[in-house]
Image (spheres, rainbow, N blue to C red):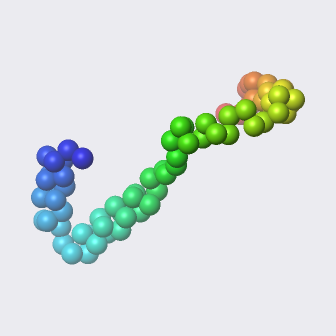
């Protein structure tokens, strides 16, 4: 994190009353819990090639049939 940004946040936070500081803390905690966690692509390489080609073909057909359609009445 940019040190200047952190300093600015702390400066603004220090002028807030305790109840608002608590709300900010709760908000930051909620944000930190919502950060996506996952694994690197390198760790997933061991799964490459495990889906049979016939199944991949069926998946492709289903995607093309269901996802490449425009619904003009959607909006």
Between 68 and 71, the one lying in front of the other is 68
The residue positioned 87% from the left and 29% from the top of the image is 54
For residue 41, what is the image quadrant? top right
Between 33 and 46, the one lying in front of the other is 46
Location of residue 38 in the rendering, given as x and y in whole percent from the top left corner:
52, 49
44 displayed left or right of 63? left
Between 61 and 66, the one lying in front of the other is 61
Whether 63 is drawn above or below 12: the answer is: above
Any part of residue 65 in sight: no
Any part of residue 3 in sight: yes
For residue 69, what is the image quadrant? top right
Whether 54 is drawn above or below 44: the answer is: above
Screen quadrant of the C terminus: top right
16 displayed left or right of 30? left
Location of residue 39 in the rendering, given as x and y in whole percent from the top left corner:
52, 46
21 displayed left or right of 50? left
Q: Residue furthest bottom?
A: 18
Whether 25 is drawn above or below 5: the answer is: below
Q: Residue furthest front?
A: 46
58 displayed left or right of 2? right
The residue positioned 83% from the left and 28% from the top of the image is 53
Location of residue 23 in the rendering, given as x and y in whole percent from the top left corner:
31, 69
Location of residue 40 in the rendering, given as x and y in whole percent from the top left corner:
51, 41
The residue positioned 18% from the left and 62% from the top of the image is 13
Whether 30 is drawn above or below 50: the answer is: below
For residue 31, what is the image quadrant? bottom left
């Amino acid at each position: 994190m940019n040190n200047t940004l952190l300093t600015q946040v702390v400066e603004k936070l220090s002028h807030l009353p305790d109840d608002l500081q608590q709300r900010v803390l709760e908000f930051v905690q909620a944000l930190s819990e919502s950060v996506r966690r996952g694994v690197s692509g390198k760790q997933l390489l061991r799964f490459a090639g495990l889906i049979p080609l016939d199944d991949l073909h069926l998946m492709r057909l289903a995607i093309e049939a269901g996802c490449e359609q425009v619904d003009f009445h959607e909006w």
